[in-house]
Amino acid sequence: MRVFLDANILFSGARPNSRMGAFLETLSRQADLLTNAYAFEEARRNLELKFPDSLKALEKLARKCEMISQFSVDLEVELPHKDQPILGGAVAERATHLLTGDERDFEKFWGKTVQGVKIVSPKMLAEEVL
């Protein structure tokens, strides 16, 4: 299993004593975690503004991830420009799953497979792996 982490997952996972952090710790023993600089930078910016004490935890979490550099620009679905590097990164690196909490832009795809990548919420992935 290869799971691409969206920025909001990185953000939540970096928060102290978060359930997401605990879930990602468990998941990292069962799956390859992937992300890209785009998602990491978005999480870093938001943490810096809201919870700067969590930046070290974000760095630690990022070290558990394979940091990918490419993304597909030929997506088969319409997404806001800001979300294209997220799904595009998952597609380019042949992730099995895209883990996102972004209800506004990705909820309509939750549970669906797009270009080989199953888009899931944290609850959906937890139910699948546990």
Image: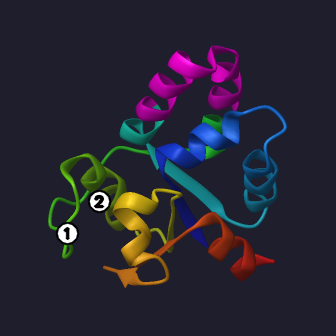
Horizontal side, residue 106 vs residue 70: left or right: right
Given the image, on which type of amino acid does mark 2 rest?
Gly
> Is 5 above or below relative to 103?
above
Q: Is residue 118 magenta?
A: no
- Main SS class of the magenta portion in the image: helix
Q: Is residue 59 magenta?
A: yes
Q: Which residue is mark 2?
A: 88
Residue 60 in picture, x, y percent from top left: 70, 31
Q: Which residue is mark 1?
A: 75
Q: Quadrant of the C terminus?
A: bottom right
**Which residue is drawn at the image coordinates 72% and 33% (left, top)?**
15
* Bounds of the magenta segment: 41-60
Snapshot quadrant of residue 45: top left
Regarding mark 2 in the picture, which secondary structure is present there?
helix
Residue 69 in picture, x, y percent from top left: 34, 44
> Is 80 above or below relative to 125?
above
Residue 59 in picture, x, y percent from top left: 63, 27
Most foreground residue, 27 or 127? 127
